[in-house]
Structure formats: structure tokens, C-alpha cells
Image: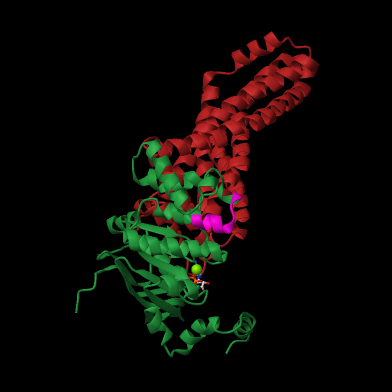
Amino acid sequence: MIDRPAPVLETRGLVVRFNGRPVLRGIDLQARAGEVLFLMGPSGCGKTTVIKCIAALLQPDEGQVLFEGRRLEGVGGGPAVDAMRRATGLVFQGSALLNSISLAENVALPLRARLRLPPAAVREVVRMKLAQVGLLHAMDLRPSELSGGMRKRAGIARALVLDPRLLLLDEPTSGLDPVTSDGIDRLVAQLRHELGVTVVVVSHDLASAERVADRLVILGQGEALVEGTWAEVQASRDPAVRSFLDRRARPPAAAAHAAWEGP
Amino acid sequence: MGLDPEVRRRAALLRLDEVLGVDDEAAGPAPRDPPAPPLRGALDAAVVLLATLYLGVRHSLTDCLTTPLGREQLARQVVEVGRRGVPIVVGVTFLIGAIIAIQTAYTLEPYGATIYVARGVGISMTRELGPLMAAVLVAARSGSAIAAELGSMVVSEEVEALEMMALRPRRFLLSPRFAALTFSVPALSVCADVAGVLGGAAIMVLQYDIVARAYFDETVRAVYLSDIGSGLIKSVFFGALIAAVACRCGLSLRGGPEAVGRAATAAVVQSIVAVVLFDAAFTFASRGIL
Ligand SMILES: Nc1ncnc2c1ncn2[C@@H]1O[C@H](COP(=O)(O)OP(=O)(O)O)[C@@H](O)[C@H]1O
Ligand SMILES: [Mg+2]
């Protein structure tokens, strides 16, 4: 058997409790170099919490996160955390752009914070990244002047500006129109194929999982219910997994009905 | 130290860990414990406030001056807090100078001593009312704005986004505001002193037939540099206090968008109380009372 590439990112037994209520009960994930891993599950199941633990913005109660083999310790930082953040682009669920400055300044901020580049070079990189997400025309607008989809794309441009090796996307396509979400899917595929970026995508979007994901993990009740390729996950018999996957098979109204009425 | 875990986490964000002696590991767990009982909460808040003050004093200038980003943020805040604050401070203290002149003239007129109004206005403006009114107006105008801005940055995860870019809240958020306020409040106090004296002069010249020249001569005779100096020294502390209170209220915000308004209100109330308490302590101590 050929060697699989070492995991870029690994979580071991993540446990997080909020007010004593366990939200994650031992999550083990692995993302290998150049792979697109989809993290799926109903809302409130702890996907964002996993992402925050990976980015060391939240300290798990138990368990650990390893980035490129190094253990991340403490929300306060430290060399391993800083090295991880330097190499990671995070797109927040709510975009988290700074509202007091323009789009171009937002995208320039990581560059200016991390590198000492001449202003002309910063401008050049910013224009390139904004062009990549189709927002060059909006570069002088404030985040509050943009639509939700534009903000999301701007968040992606900001996350890409330091050419990360790991990209964490928290619901990049939720609430977006199909054309924009297709564009984001294509961008993810392109980053993976051309630059070998490892991508972790939090999503509800089964269609885009089928198209872009190398592997999927479905979370439920704070645990990974199933993990594997699209085909492997489709073969799962777990009722919670089935109810998540089969949403698509039902007509939307019936699905909504079922969701409200419960099992 | 037996601090509330949430306080410890916020402390870690601000790099207060070095002050509070909690290591990063201990500072970890995020908001997940029930809120502390009220008295503990107040004590924790006081500890964090003192630590915030300490960090501001120790780091704000180096944080702001050593990087282009820091200088840019500082300049922004000086314009926002200082320059934009000038009209309101000048307007209000001009009127206060005029009011004091009228009230003092009312007591002195029977003795034909209205020229001494210049002394009363000059000394009370420079020693007390100029710095105090500048501080109260800055607390109302900028203290609330800072708490609301930082609070909504916490809510919308902007603070976490900054963490990802290695822009620590202390360096990037606290320090520029702290430096800007400790500089701007004294600067606004000078404006307030001048405006107050002018307000007094306007009343005396227009209503009491005092020659402007005489009014200003009397002011210069009565007001010593030490009066102006003691007012300015106080106002440096006022600025630092307002900055620390406002940043604490914003950055330690818990809950969602509805908490932002509360943080802004708390910042105004707490910073005005802090300013007046400090003013009382400073004045009592310098007069040998207590
Ligand atoms: N800061 C917090 N304090 C308390 N509970 C939280 C906090 N953040 C998230 N939770 C809870 O944890 C659960 C998982 O949240 P989250 O990870 O955001 O879910 P998802 O991203 O999958 O929709 C939710 O039930 C949410 O209410
Ligand atoms: Mg989420």
C-alpha cells in the first residue's frame, strides 16, 4: 500500500462543553495535504465550534489539535498557534470583516500585519485577490455597503491574501444564490488542484459536497457519525446520517414539514 | 487567582495574562460557565480595569509608534476623539464660563468688585471645570463610541478575525485608543480653559461694562501656571481612565448585539464615576484633606 500523505490537520478527542452542556463529545478529524474535507451536519451541531478549536480561538475542554504535526496550545497564542495562523486562512460564518474600513483595506490588513511590503506591492496583491473573487469593482466600499454574498467573497479574499496552506471555510455558500455558490465551489477546487491547498469546508450543501469534497464527515450529537468519500457516506445506514442525506430526495415542502414535526 | 473563567479568557485576549499571572493554558476555556455572582463580577471587573490601565500605561506608546499600522490607528483615534471633539468642548465650556461669570458677578456686584469675576472664572476653569468638562464630554462622546465599537467587534467576531492576523486586541485596539485619549483629554482641556475664560469675558464685557483688556490682565494676574498644570495633570489621568473603562466595557462584552447598547451605557456611567472619584481623591490629597 502506498504511503498516504501525513495529515496537515488533526484533531484528537475534542470535547467542548458550554455551560456544562457537551457540544462536542470527542471529535477526531484528519485532513491530509491537498484534500478538501467537508464538515457537515444540522445547524447547532457544533461545526463552527470545531473550526474555532482548529484555529485556536477556543480552547477545547479535552483533546488536542495538531497542525503539521505540532500541537496547538492555548488561545493566548504561542509559537505553534502563531505558525498555524500564519499558514491558515479562516473565513468566518458571518464574514467578520472590519466595518470601519474599506474592502481593499480589509483584504490588505493580514498582509500589513504579517509582512513589511511596500504599499504598491500590497495594493497589487489586494487587487489580485479581489479579482479572484470578482470584487475588484467594489474595493472602495465599506462592508456595510455590500450584500451578504459579496461580504462572504470578500472574507474569502482576505483569507487567501497570505497564500495559506490550510483554508477553513465556515458555511461559504449558505444563503447565496446558485451562481455565486458555484463560483465558490470552483474556487475551492481550483485552490486544491493548482496550489495544493488543504481545505476544510463547513457546509449544509450536499450538491457542492458531491462536486468538491474528497472526504466528508457528518456530525451529529457532538460526534462524527460517519466519515469517508461521498460514495462511502452514501452507503451509511445510520438513521441520523440518512435523515441528513435524504433531505435532498424529498420534495422541499415535505422535507420542511418532516423537519418541523420531528421523527 | 480565582477569577471567573470568562474574565480570564478576555484577559488572555488582551494579553493581561502577564499581569494577572495566569498562563495561557489556564486562560483557555471560552464562555461556558454560569455568570459570576454580582460582587465577584464587580471585583473581577475592577481587577481587569486596573490591569487594562497598567497595560495601557506600559505598552500603548510603543505599540502605536513602532509600526505603520499602529501609527495609522493612533492618528485615526486622535482625529476621532480629539479633533472632532473640539467644537462641542469649546461650545459647552464657553457657556459654562459665561454662567460662572454671571453667578459670581451676582455675589460680587454689591461690593463693586465685579473685576474679580475674572479671578473666579480663570481659577475655576483651569483648576477644575475645564479638565472636568472636557473629560465628561469625552466620556459621553467617545467612551460610549469606543465601547460600542469594540463591543460590536466582539459580537461580529472581528476581534477573532484580528487574532488570526496576529493583531492582538491590546496592540491593535486598546493601545491606540489609550494613547489617543491620554493625549486628547489634556489637549481638549486646554481648549476648554481658553473657551471658559472667553465665555466669562464675553459676559463681563457685554453686560457689566468691564474693559476686555482689564478682564484679561486680571485673569493673567490671578491664574498661575501651576493652576493650569494641575488641571492638565489631572486630565491626563482622566483620559487614561476613560480609555481603560471604555475598552474594558467593549472587549469584555458577553452576549449578542443587544449587549452592545448596555456596554456603551456602562462605559459612560462608569467612566464619569471613575473620573469624579479620581478628581476628588486628587483634589483632597493635593489640599491635604484626609
Ligand atoms: N459562546 C457560546 N456560548 C454558549 N453556547 C454556545 C456558544 N457557541 C456555541 N454555542 C452552542 O453550541 C452549539 C454548537 O454551535 P455551533 O458550533 O455554532 O453550531 P453550528 O456551527 O454547527 O451551527 C449550539 O447549540 C450553540 O448554541
Ligand atoms: Mg456555524
Residue at x 41%, y 72% (from the top left corner): A38
Q: Which chain is red?
A: B
- In the rendering, at what x and y percent does residue B55 appear? 41, 45
The residue range painted magenta reads: A145-153
Q: Residue at x 65, y 19 (%)?
A: B119
- Percent from the top left, x then y, of residue B11? 42, 55
| Residue A169 x %, y % | 44, 63
Q: Is residue B110 magenta?
A: no
Does residue A95 sit above or below B34 in this rendering? above
Q: Nearer the viewer, residue A168 or B168?
A: A168
Question: A47 or B120: which is nearer to us?
Answer: A47
Where, by quadrant of the figure, is residue A80 drawn?
A: bottom left
Q: Is residue B262 visible?
A: yes
| Secondary structure that dominates the magenta span | helix
| Colour seen for chain A | green
Left or right: B272 as drawn, with respect to B1: right
Question: Would you place residue A200 above or below residue B90 in this image?
Answer: below
Question: Residue at left 35%, top 39%?
Answer: A117
Kindly tell me whether residue B53 is visible in this rendering: no
Residue B230 on image: x %, y %: 52, 27
Q: Is residue A151 magenta?
A: yes
